[in-house]
Amino acid sequence: MNIERNILLKNLTTFKIGGLANYFCKIKSLEELKQAVSFAKQNELPIFILGGGSNVLISDYGFEGLVIKIELKDILIEEKEKFIFIIAGAGESWDKIVKLSVESELYGIENLSYIPGTVGGAAAGNIGAYGAEIKDTIESIEIFDTDTFETLVLNKDECGFNYRDSIFKKRKGKNYIITKVCFKLLKKERINLLYKDVKIYFENKNNLSPTLEEVRKAIGEIRNKKFPNLVKYGTAGSFFKNPVISSKVADNLKKKYPKIDIFEGKNGNKKISLAGLLDNIGLKGIRDGDVGTFENQPLVFVNYGNARAKEIKNFSEKIIQKIFNKIKIKIFIEIIFVGDFKK
C-alpha cells in the first residue's frame, strides 16, 4: 500500500470539484485497509472513504486527513433455491453489477441501471431510481470496524435503511467501512413498470411485458434525457432529496401545482417530486456563473466549467431558501459535503 501526499481530489469526483487530500491511498485488500486505518490512527488523522466520487462535493480546500479510495473488487455468485446471490466487493462499479444481473437474467436491480458510483457507495446511500431502491435486494453487508479492526456481517435490518439513508451515514455507523455487499436476486420474472416514466415508455411502444434487456435500455434512454453528459459537465446527480410531507400539505400543494407528482410515503405521509415542483416555480435551468440546475432535470446541479465548491453550496442554499419562501417546505441535501466549507 502506498500513501501519497497532496493528491488533487477534483479528478476523482464526478462534480470535478475539490482541493487536495493531505494524505491519500488506494485500497485493494482488507489487509491494506487495516494498514491505512492504522496509519490514520497513529497520526491522528480523520478518514474519508471515497468510492466513485459520484455523490460528493469536496471543499475547495480539500480534506485535511487521509482519503481512502476503496478499490476492493471481487464478484462471487451463489445459487440457493429460487434466488441467486451476487456478492460484490465495495469497490466494484455499481453498473457493472446491474449489467451482470441483466445478462444473467436475474431480476431486482435493473431499474437502477446506469447510476454512477461503486457498490459500497450505492449501498451506503441506499440509491434509488424509477421505482426501485437498492435496499430491496440487499441481503447483508460486510463491514470493517475501524475501532475494533474486526470484520463483521450486518443483515439488512441492521443496516438502518431509509430514504437515501442508512446506518453508514449516521453517527452509529461512523466506524464502519463497507467491504462487500450481498444482493439477493430473483430467477423468476418480476418486471417493475410502476414508475410513471418507465410505464409511459413501454406504453408508447405497446410493450407491457419487456425483457430485462429492454428495461435496462429504457432506463438508459430515460436517464440520458434527464442527466448531463459526465464527460462534458460536472455533476453529482440529484442534489436534493424529495420532500416527505403530511397528506394535508401535499393535497394543498397539489391544488396549487396540479402537474406535480405525489407518491405514497410511510405513516400516512406523502413524498412529492421535487423536480416537478422546481420546474413549476421557475427553478429549472437557472444559472449563476458556472453553477446551475440542469435544463432537463432541475434536481441536478451542473458544474459548467470552473465552479468552486463554495459556489455550489451557496447556490444550493439560495434554492432551499427560495423554495421555503414560496411554499414553506424545507428540503434537504442528498449529496455529502466533504472538508471545510467555512473558510
Image (cartoon, grey):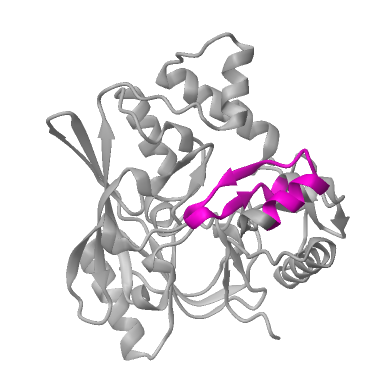
User: Nearest the camera: 301 or 157?
Assistant: 157
Question: Can residue 285 be seen from the camera position used here?
Answer: no
Residue segment shown in magenta: 249-275
- Which residue: 70% across, 69% down? 309
> Is residue 266 located in the magenta-colored stretch of the structure?
yes
User: Up-down: is 129 above or below 140?
Assistant: above
Q: Quadrant of the C terminus?
A: bottom right
User: Nearest the camera: 264 or 197?
Assistant: 264
Whole-percent x and y of residue 277?
Answer: 76, 49
Question: Can residue 71 be seen from the camera position used here?
Answer: yes
Q: Is residue 278 left or right of residue 9?
A: right
Q: Is residue 189 left or right of residue 6?
A: left
Q: Quadrant of residue 213?
A: top left
User: Up-down: is 25 above or below 240?
Assistant: below
User: Nearest the camera: 17 or 336?
Assistant: 336
User: Nearest the camera: 187 or 175?
Assistant: 187
Q: Is residue 226 left or right of residue 145?
A: right
> Is residue 184 located in the magenta-colored stretch of the structure?
no
- Which residue: 67% across, 74% down? 60
